[in-house]
Amino acid sequence: MRRTRALLFLATSLLACGGATEVFPCDFEGRCPGLMSCDPSTLTCLDGPGASCEAPDVACGGDCVDVQSNAQHCGGCNRACASGQSCEAGRCATPTTCAFCPPGTTCIAGECSCGGRGELCSGAVCLDTRQSALSCGACFMPCQDTDAFCRDGACTCGQGRTACDGACTDTRFDPSHCGDCTTTCSAGQHCDDGSCVATCTHNAADACGDGRCWDTAVDPRHCGASCDSCGTGQVCAAGTCACPTSSTTCASDGCVDVTLDARHCGGCGQACPGGEVCQAGACTCPPGTTRCGSACVDLQTDGANCGGCAQACAAGQMCSGGACTATCGLIVQPCGASCPDTSMDPAHCGGCDQPCGAGEVCVSMSCAEVRPALGCTACPCAACDELAQLCCASPAGVVCVDGFRCPW
């Protein structure tokens, strides 16, 4: 303190005698004596007036700042806080709460997060950049070829297909890329099983009418004498489209697993009520919900069953966290006496009283189709790739979800 007062006295005296002849440091609050101002780059006092500030602000680089709350001048000029920190009472601090987070995200250590279920893109929506063909490897970066799917953040072609010149093709039967991406068959030749030939061994009758030697005995895209494209989940066996032995043929949806498919639970056409899942061929409530009467409800948010079945909140109250309260909070949209998360609640998907149908889940405020991943017990799954859907591990098993991220 004595040294600071001495410097102030000396600087004032020199200014009175016609100007500063020595260099003086700014004090710990970025202030200088007399009409001098503080240079933030050197923390030294310069000739000439700086900003005229009123307490509690101080002059930093010619600007008046509140060093008690300014993250670039926290506790003094040029004392910047680290990225993500804020300035509280002149000290850098890591925030623990969020002012607002978009639907489908949670606040973790002061930052909005997707909670491991995708990447937060543009601070607004969670997208699975590992397997979404619309955002593959990075936010809003779609795969260019419509036949490509996204695997581990990279666009790739399906089984038996190769990326050549930016497009997916079958090099076994493509005369422009026969056997590899660089070989082109001569005029009049065909590509059969990766070799240029004069006549086709496969599909000699040209069932598809395109002059290609497709293997119509096993190719689900060109199956049999009629060159049929097999339906969802079907395989081509001996020139006939059929469902795998582990599934059942249901006319409206092709091959289904009646032990897991909520649209055909236990048998074709036996749909579960909206919001319920199918396990071992029986409809049941999904994890996180409880059956109260005939409905599956979330005891944490349902105003008619708050904390337990038939425990209704009083008039004017709402159910939040399993207890009746006065409000739902800043981020949750109230629906009557309930406080549902409209980004994932199948009974209030995207808004109050907007239920999803059988075989659908609520993902990012939209209802998305869910199908069992036929033939798969873990992700990734070729069945989901063929459907251009995400492979997700659900409480009922591995499923294919028609969405931008997995809901679980």
Image (cartoon, rainbow, N blue to C red):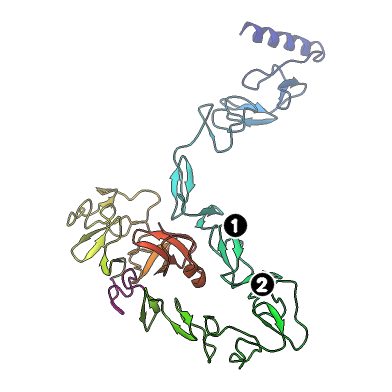
- Residue 398 as seen in the image, left or right of residue 310: right
Q: Secondary structure at mark 1?
A: loop
Residue that extends furthest to the bottom in the rendered view of this protein:
205
- Residue 341 as seen in the image, left or right of residue 121: left
Quadrant of the rendered structure where residue 82 is? Answer: top right
For disc 1, the neighbor class at 10 Å (few under 14, some 14 to 19, many from 20) is many
| Residue drawn at the location 18% of the way across and 56% of the way down | 309
Could you tell me if the residues under marks 2 and 1 are in contact, i.e. CB atoms within 8 Å?
Answer: no
Q: Nearer the viewer, residue 295 or 150?
A: 150
Residue 344, magenta (yes or no): no
How far from the left and from the top, in percent, is residue 22? 79, 13
**Residue type at the position of mark 1:** Gly
**Residue type at the position of mark 2:** Ala
Q: Earlier in the sequence, mark 2 or mark 1?
A: 1
Establish if 52 lies above or below 394.
above
Quadrant of the rendered structure where residue 214 is? Answer: bottom right
Residue 137, label in figure: 1
Start and end of the magenta stretch? Answer: 257-272
Q: Secondary structure at mark 2?
A: strand
What residue does disc 2 label? Answer: 167
Query: Viewer-nearest of labels 2 and 1?
Result: 2
Q: Nearer the viewer, residue 196 or 27?
A: 196
How far from the left and from the top, in percent, is residue 102? 47, 53
- Residue 247 as seen in the image, left or right of residue 24: left
| Residue drawn at the location 64% of the way across and 89% of the way down | 210
